[in-house]
Image (cartoon, rainbow, N blue to C red):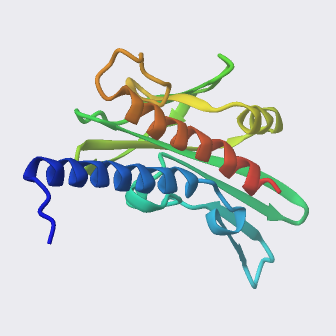
Amino acid sequence: MISIPIKFQKLYKMKSLILNVFIVLSMNTYAQTFDCTKIITSRVDKISGELTKTSSYYPFKGVYAQIQSPVGYMRVTKDGDTTTYISVSVVGSTLNVGEKGVILLLSNGVKIERPDAKIDYNSDTYGWKYSAFFSLNQDEIELLKNNEIEIIRLYIYDADYSNPDSSVVGSKTMVKYNSMIRNYFKEAIICITQ
């Protein structure tokens, strides 16, 4: 029987571990493509005939399966009239009550602004969760279908999904995560308006 030196056994184990991590991450990245039938649910009110479509708040797979999307969409159609809504949320460290104002900064530099949008709040594991819900006009829907949301601001709190400087520690992971989130924001609005 041939005996393999310990240092070669450790090297083999390390290479095996690196290969397995690479395979899992590659599969996980591939798994984040979105199927509209999996991220949009539809419901028809049997009395009013109103059709309501909503996007999933938990659309991700693999290690990201427990991440809640900070953006959700709802599309309501009744008697031929359709309205599309967006729900956005961010986390803040301090409690602010009765505040207003939402800004969505898109990848093309355009801002969707609602200075009078009421901001709701709830306690969260990481502080306070602030959220707003408002309707979108057709021009804004087209902007969201063709551009990614990079920054969500509610009152003074930001959720920044732009890509960090490559010199920042952990920037490769953040680029992957932020790209996945921004892609979902865009795919969900495309799916819900079909």
| Count of labels in the image | 0
Residue 134 visible, this orientation: no
Residue 5 position in % (x across, y down)? 10, 53
Tell me the residue at 25%/36% (across/down): 95
Looking at this view, is 36 or 93 the one in front?
36
Indicate the quadrant where residue 166 lies.
Answer: top left
Q: Residue furthest front?
A: 1
Indicate the quadrant where residue 79 lies.
Answer: bottom right
Tell me the residue at 38%/23% (across/down): 156
157 above or below 79?
A: above
Residue 126 position in % (x across, y down)? 23, 44
Looking at this view, is 20 or 177 the one in front?
20
Residue 87 position in % (x across, y down)? 55, 47
Residue 164 lies left or right of residue 108; in this view the side is: left
Residue 47 lies left or right of residue 33; in this view the side is: right
Q: Residue furthest left?
A: 6
Q: Residue furthest bottom?
A: 46
Residue 39 position in % (x across, y down)? 62, 63
34 above or below 164?
A: below
Residue 138 lies left or right of residue 18; in this view the side is: right
Indicate the quadrant where residue 147 lies.
Answer: top right
Image quarter where the C terminus lies is bottom right
Image quarter where the N terminus lies is bottom left
Tell me the residue at 80%/36% (across/down): 142
Looking at this view, is 118 or 184 the one in front?
184
Residue 169 visible, this orientation: yes
Tell me the residue at 26%/50% (across/down): 124
